C-alpha cells in the first residue's frame, strides 16, 4: 500500500554512488536531481478497508504503547478520543502537522508513518460495550515457560506506530499520547527497530538480533487465502464493526543472547532449521535459497531428519499445527544491559491473524517442543481487536462506538 517503495530510493542511492566511484571528483561530479532517498516523501494511506501497519512493508522504527481508559471515561469520552487520534493520524501520515503541533517532525515528510489502533478486553467493559466484544478476543492463556510481567502486558487501548524515521515515529507517539488527555493513561510503552530500507540493494527479509533471516515463512499477500488467515471473517450483527479488522497478539520476547552466542553456527542452524547466511531450509542442501520450499520429510544420509524434530520451523509450521497460520510483523528491541551484563534485547513479536486462536495453537505447540524455547523468554503479553480501516470522513472504531 505504500505509494513508493524503498527500492526506488535504493536505486537512486546506487546511481549516485556509481557516479562517485567513476572518478576521483566523487559526488561533486554528479549533478543529478535524483533524490538520494524517497524515504521522507513516502506516504502510506490512512484510509482503507484495513488499517495500515498490518500488510505495510516493515518500517525501520516501531513504537508500541498501551493505554488504560480512566475508570469513569465511558463511551462518550472514548469516542472523542478515537476521533482526536484519527484526525491527528490522518494529518501526520500525509506529512501534515496535526493541530497544536510541537514541530518535532516539521520538515521530515511522512516517512511511511503508519498508526494502527486496537482495543483490549477492558475497553469494552469500560465503555459499556461488553455485548459487542468479539468472541474471539479471549484472554491469553498462561504457557508453561512464560515469565510474564503483568505491568507490561494487556491494556484497554493499543497503538502500533511504524515509520522510517525516528523523529517522525517519536513525534506520532508524543502527539497521540498528549491527545489521550484525561481519557486514558499510559500503561506500558516499548520501542523497536528493523533494518533501514535502502540498506540492501533490494528489499530483503530482515534479520533479527540472533542474526537469522526472519519472516520467510510468512503468508504472502499474493496467497489465495491470505485475507482469510489474516483478517477477521465478515459478520453481521454485534460483531459487524470488526469487518476488515484483524487481531494483534503482542509478546515481548527476550533473547538470551549470551547463551545463543555459546552455540556453534551449525548448532544455531539446527535450532531454527534454516541456514543463517541465506535463510535456506536445511532440507535444501547446497544450492538452496531462502525461497526453496522446506521438506519436512527429508533425511540426511545418516538417517537423521534434515530439519530436526525440534527445529523451530518444523514445530511452528502450519503443517504441524492443523493449518494454524499467523502473520509475523515485529520489531527488534534493545533496552540496554542488565546489571549482570546481559543485553535486555529481543523481539517485540507481533502477529496478525483472523483469530487469536491461531497464535494460541502455535504457541502451545512451540512451548516446550521447540528447541528455540531454551534461548528466549516471553516477558509480556497482550491481545487486541484491531478494527477495520476508517473510510474518508470516518474515525477508527466508529462502527463500534456510534
Ligand atoms: C519461522 C525466529 C518466535 C512462529 C521463524 C524463522 C526464524 C524465527 C528465524 C525462520 C524464518 C521465517 O520463516 O521467518 C524466531 C525468533 C523468535 C520466534 C527469534 C523469538 C524470539 C516465534 C513465535 C511464534 C513463531 C513465538 C509463534 C507463536 C513462527 C512461524 C514460522 C517461524 C509460524 C514459519 C514456519 C514456516 O516456515 O512455516 N522464526 N521466532 N516464532 N516462526 Fe519464529
Image: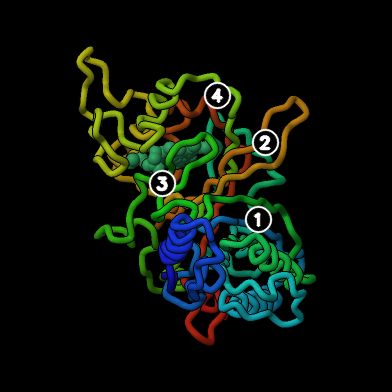
Under circle 2, the secondary element is: strand
For the residues marked 4 and 3, what is the alpha-carbon distance in whole angstroms? Answer: 21 Å
Under circle 4, the secondary element is: helix
Residue 155 badge: 1
Q: Residues within 10 Å of mark 4 (few under 14, many from 20)?
A: few
According to the picture, the residue beneath numbered tag 2 turns out to be: 344
- Are the residues tagged 1 and 4 within 8 Å (C-beta)? no
Q: Give the x, y percent position of residue 199.
A: 49, 53
From the viewer's perspective, is the residue at label 1 or at label 4 nearer?
4
**Residue sitting at the far bottom:** 393
Q: Earlier in the sequence, mark 4 or mark 3?
A: 3
Under circle 3, the secondary element is: loop
Q: Earlier in the sequence, mark 1 or mark 2?
A: 1
Question: Is residue 402 shown left or right of residue 285?
Answer: right
According to the picture, the residue beneath numbered tag 4 turns out to be: 261
Q: Earlier in the sequence, mark 3 or mark 1?
A: 1
Toward the viewer: 198 or 272?
Answer: 198
Q: Earlier in the sequence, mark 4 or mark 2?
A: 4
- Are the residues tagged 2 and 3 within 8 Å (C-beta)? no
Under circle 1, the secondary element is: loop
According to the picture, the residue beneath numbered tag 3 turns out to be: 215
Amino acid at each position: 500500500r505504500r505509494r513508493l517503495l524503498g527500492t526506488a530510493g535504493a536505486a537512486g542511492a546506487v546511481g549516485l554512488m556509481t557516479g562517485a566511484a567513476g572518478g576521483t571528483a566523487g559526488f561533486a561530479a554528479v549533478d543529478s536531481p535524483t533524490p538520494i532517498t524517497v524515504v521522507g516523501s513516502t506516504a502510506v494511506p490512512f484510509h482503507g478497508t484495513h488499517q495500515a501497519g498490518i500488510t505495510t512493508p516493515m518500517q525501520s522504527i516501531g513504537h508500541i504503547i498501551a493505554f488504560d481508559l480512566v475508570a469513569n471515561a465511558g463511551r462518550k469520552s472514548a469516542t472523542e478520543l478515537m476521533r482526536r487520534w484519527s484526525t491527528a493520524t490522518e494529518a501526520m501520515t500525509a506529512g501534515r502537522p496535526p493541530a497544536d503541533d510541537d514541530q518535532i517532525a516539521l520538515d521530515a515528510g511522512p516517512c511511511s508513518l503508519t498508526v494502527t489502533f486496537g482495543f483490549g478486553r477492558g475497553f469494552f467493559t469500560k465503555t459499556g460495550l461488553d455485548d459487542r466484544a468479539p468472541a474471539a478476543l479471549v484472554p491469553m492463556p498462561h504457557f508453561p515457560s512464560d515469565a510474564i510481567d503483568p505491568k507490561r502486558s494487556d491494556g484497554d487501548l493499543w497503538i502500533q506506530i511504524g515509520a522510517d524515521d525516528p523523529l517522525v515515529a517519536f513525534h506520532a507517539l508524543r502527539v497521540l499520547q498528549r491527545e489521550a488527555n484525561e481519557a486514558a493513561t499510559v500503561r506500558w510503552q516499548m520501542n523497536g527497530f528493523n533494518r533501514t530500507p535502502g540498506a540492501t540493494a533490494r528489499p530483503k527479509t530482515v534479520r533479527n538480533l540472533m542474526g537469522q533471516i526472519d519472516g520467510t515463512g510468512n503468508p504472502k499477500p499474493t496467497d489465495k487465502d491470505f485475507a482469510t488467515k489474516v483478517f477477521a471473517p465478515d459478520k453481521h450483527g454485534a460483531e459487524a464493526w470488526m469487518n476488515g479488522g484483524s487481531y494483534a497478539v503482542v509478546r515481548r520476547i527476550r533473547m538470551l543472547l549470551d547463551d545463543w552466542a555459546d552455540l556453534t553456527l551449525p548448532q544455531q542452524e539446527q535450532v531454527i532449521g534454516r541456514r543463517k547466511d541465506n535463510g535456506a531450509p536445511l532440507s535444501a542442501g547446497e544450492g538452496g535459497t531462502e525461497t526453496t520450499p522446506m521438506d519436512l520429510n527429508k533425511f540426511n544420509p545418516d538417517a537423521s531428519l534434515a530439519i530436526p524434530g525440534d527445529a523451530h520451523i518444523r514445530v511452528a509450521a502450519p503443517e504441524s499445527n492443523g493449518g494454524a497460520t499467523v502473520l509475523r510483523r515485529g520489531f527488534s528491541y534493545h533496552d540496554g544491559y542488565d546489571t549482570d551484563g546481559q543485553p535486555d534485547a529481543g523481539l517485540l513479536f507481533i502477529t496478525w491473524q483472523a483469530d487469536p486462536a491461531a497464535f494460541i495453537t502455535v504457541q502451545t505447540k512451540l512451548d516446550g517442543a521447540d528447541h528455540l524455547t531454551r534461548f528466549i523468554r516471553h516477558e509480556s503479553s497482550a491481545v487486541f481487536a484491531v478494527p477495520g480501516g476508517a473510510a474518508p470522513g470516518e474515525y477508527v472504531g466508529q462502527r463500534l462506538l456510534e
